[in-house]
Image (spheres, rainbow, N blue to C red):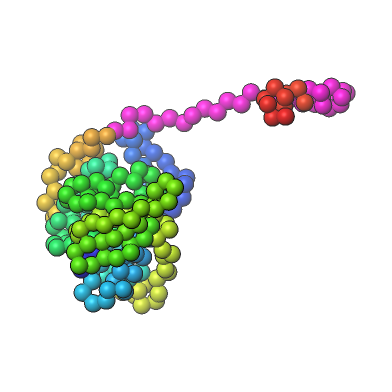
Amino acid sequence: MKIVVLVKQVPATDNVKMDEETGTMIRDGIESEVNPLDLYAIEEAVRIKERIGEGVEINVLSMGPKKAVEAVRSAIAIGCDKGYLLSDRKFAGSDTWVTAYALSTGITKLVSGFDLILCGERATDGETGQVGPEVGAYLGLPALTYVSKIEEIGNGKIIAHRAVEGGHEVVESPLPVLVSVVKEINTPRMPNFSGKMKAKKIEIPLLTAEDIGADEERLGLQGSPTRVVKIFRPQVARKGKIVSTAGDPDGAVSGLVDFLTEKTII
């Protein structure tokens, strides 16, 4: 069985800045980490490998700047086998649809005969939850979203539990399939020493758009059908009332009570 895990490197802080001209996030000079929600996809892939045993290969794929190779290494340290990074200036500014196109093209090029693609529910920097299902659409795969449990996988099928409003639903799908997971599916492990050493030594190929055979006109800002047309900071205007006890404490208390009553607080 061949498993592909999609991971993303995201800012390790909420204090991010946007480029007002391009509408894209400024990532230079910001500490980064593996998207926290991708850790659950990595963990589930490793658990499947431990459950099935020999014959399972876990491939990690990411797209981003060269420093995103650390996100791939982090996944290998936890128990994945191989890793690839799509890194090219031609990918810069890609929206979710273009990102999914590049990733799906990379999967087709790099991992022939895959059975399962795993990804996190969403990335914490974009919060769209679109890339995973869009990769499935590009590859013509069924997409199981919000999966909280993989009950069975093998013999050409998967049985999974999906978190839905008010409970869970049990679904069955043929393989290959794309699965996006939620936090309830497992508890991610920490990498051990041998895993860290393996991740440090392993070669992570950096692949360009040409390497994976991507159509350059469908990449980056020029290929993205969505645009951030305006970025602005909302102005918060608070019209308050100053109540002073100086000279007239009874009047101040009365004024405060009237104010709270007017605002339906009391």
Residue 153 spot, x, y in % from top left: 26, 65
- For the C terminus, the image quarter is top right
Q: Main secondary structure of the magenta part?
A: loop
Q: Is residue 246 above or below residue 100?
A: above
Instruction: Say whether residue 161 is visible.
Output: yes
Of residues 233 and 119, the one nearer the viewer is 119
Q: Tell me: 191 left or right of 236.
A: left
Q: Is residue 149 above or below residue 165?
A: below
Residue 15 spot, x, y in % from top left: 47, 45
Q: Magenta part of the protein: which range?
A: 227-256
Q: Tell me: 185 left or right of 173.
A: right
Instruction: Say whether residue 70 is visible.
Output: no
- Number of labels in the image equals 0
Going 14% across and 48% down the picture, which residue do you hit? Answer: 214
Going 84% across and 22% down the picture, which residue do you hit? Answer: 251
Of residues 168 and 84, the one nearer the viewer is 168
246 is within the stretch colored magenta: yes
Residue 52 spot, x, y in % from top left: 27, 73
- For the N terminus, the image quarter is bottom left
The picture quadrant where one finds residue 26 is top left
